[in-house]
Amino acid sequence: MPLNPILALGGLACALFTLGATGAVGWLPVPDREFLARSELVTLAPGSFAHPLPGEFLRQNHPVSAPVVRATVAEPFEIMKYQVSASDYRRCVMAGACKPADGRGSGNVPVTGVSHIDAEAYADWLSAETGSAWRLPTDVEWAYAAGERFRGDIEAGETDPNNPAQRWLVQYRTEASLGRQPDPQPRIRGGFGPNSKGVADIAGNVWEWTSTCYVHTTEAADGAGIASSIDNCGVHVVEGFHRTYMSNFIRDGKSGGCAVGTPPDNLGFRLVRDRLNLVQAAIRWLRLS
Amino acid sequence: MLTRREALLGSVLAAAAVATVGSMPAMASAKEVAGLPREKVTLVAPPFVHAHDQVAKSGPKVVEFTMTIEEKPMVIDADGTQLNAMTYNGSIPGPLMVVHEGDYVELTLINPDTNTLAHNIDFHAATGGLGGGALTLVNPGEQTTLRFKATRSGTFVYHCAPGGPMIPWHVVSGMNGAIMILPRDGLKDDKGKPVRYDHIYYIGESDFYIPRDEQGKFKKYDSAGDNYDDTVKVMRGLIPTHVVFNGKAGSLTGENAMKAKVGETVLIVHSQANRDTRPHLIGGHGDHVWEQGKFANPPAKDLETWFIRGGSAGAALYTFLQPGVYAYVNHNLIEAVELGATAHFTVDGSWDDDLMMQVEAPRAIAS
């Protein structure tokens, strides 16, 4: 599969944002207003931040910690304050556009037991339903929204390249020492509180799907840049208490990854709403009509 | 129509009737035993094993153990699923007892009055009296002491066997463990050469049968007696809802992973009181394996996976040659990954490129 240069992710995520919010509001069809009356969005201002890239990295044939880059969010973007609820997801199921979730809760708890495929189906349905463009956040967007609650991968740091087991052991022990106990029961949305940016339930007990693919990257021998990389979009980045990677069809994180160590308690998601310019909004509205 | 309580008592009476025909030790033997030195051992919870000599330092003795039966709810997976457990000494499995061949095992079994059921103990290592089951039935509020001679070396299961349908139910509720009877001169390889271990770990594998409600969720019960009817229905299907090591999925992982260093030799004792299993150390081997657990037989060498018959305990000796995180699994991988039968070893030391190395890390296929 061809690769997006992942260092450009921060910019890429915002390529679609071409116009501010005010111009588009008048074009909202009625169902969108109803939905927005119930769902809260947080608008995040542009900014840049230090971000450890997702995926596996090799330098001179040895695995190394992910490089930390300066990621940039160039335009403001809107992200759901809460994870998509079980009751909202159920509307999609009732409409025949989503498969029933395998999750535990109903009502105002995050929907859980959903795969990447389910999350995308919901985003497509919601977009059609509301006339807005909803999608999963990228890894960079999620990290930006997560702010101080972002952890990234559990890394081993510098280890002896001649002893691959050192890295495995350090990662295993680091994860174990975090002492996180299983916490499978989803809570009423907001139960884990907002972060400094007003985004709720980040890094609680529901891990969230992103639109970023899993990638193997080989760094240049001098460490300054990328020699090559291969992505695998059958596996996506999942974010929460820690960052991990799951096959698209997995609904229960416990059996979907993290061969050793702490698996996600639950898999859920929240969406980003792209702001459409007047022309895009008009096309979308006309298509719906 | 029997009530449940009557049914439980009925089994007690049946076991008591069996007890009257059980054999009693001869007086002369008892006198001889009275002259032997005695040692009191405090048991420790698995996977650890109480301190013991691998080679006996003196002649036979009487080794005294005490186990208290605890009925209590225990969580058996990450979802918080609850088992109304019945345990020897509070752990699943019960503690591993270690003696030498020719020693006498003297167990005091206590059934506190906070429990609700009658219990006993059947040692597969013991001879006669239903393995001791016929002489040890204790109601809540009672205690009893059993002595048996360790006549055969090996690893052997013990379990509760209080009669009829109570037997499998008590066993799959957690009442099982193992005893290891070492040859007085210690373990030997297939050529009769002594072998020793730096660490010993005891893994007791359990198959649990937790009833589900109409929505498919695991049910919770106030007490062991309340779950009996539902649990037996699941048991009769013979498909466990959980297959776990040491009482809980993940009980031997993370902070609780077993530890060793490169160059160290580990003896892994693995018991399964009810159902067949097939341990496998991913990335390692069984250097010397007493698959049936009996040390009078020469150990098999270089096994990849070994077979533990339901109702037995086996022992595998392995010297770690490479550092890393090892998974020790029941190599029915569905049971290992989906039902819980996975443990980990963390092993420190230097990597041996001769044994393994990554010649080339993953890269794009050369065109």
Image: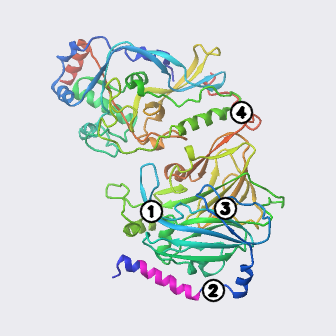
Type of amino acid at the residue the image marks with label 3: Gly
Q: Nearer the viewer, mark 2 or mark 1?
A: 1
Which one is earlier in the sequence, the residue at label 3 or at label 1?
Answer: 1
Residue behind mark 2: B23
Residue closer to the observer: B87 or B174 = B87
First-in-chain label (2 vs 1) = 2
How far apart are the alpha carbons under marks 3 and 4?
33 Å
Q: Camera-side residue: B236 or A69?
A: A69
The subunit letter for the residue under badge 3 reads: B
Residue bearing mark 4:
B357
Is residue B44 or residue A23 the one in the foreground?
Answer: B44
Please report the bounds of the magenta region as a residue range: B8-21
Specify which label sits upstream in the sequence, 4 or 2.
2
Secondary structure of the residue carrying numbered label 1: strand
Q: Position of residue A274 (x, y in %)?
A: 30, 20
Q: Residue at x 72, y 84 (%)?
A: B31
- Disc 2 crowd, CA 10 A, few/some/many (<14, 14-19, 20+): some
* Left or right of A279 in this view: B271: right
Pointer 3 residue: B314
Quarter of the figure with the C terminus of chain A: top left
Q: Chain of mark 4?
A: B
Are discs 3 and 4 located on one and the same chain?
yes
Q: Amino acid at mark 4?
A: Met
- For residue A134, say whether it is visible: yes
Of tags 1 and 4, the one toward the viewer is 1
Is B37 placed left or right of B178 in the picture?
Answer: right
Percent coordinates x, y for residue A171 in the rendering = 58, 34
Mark 2 or mark 3: which comes first in sequence? 2
Q: Is residue A5 above or below residue B16?
A: above
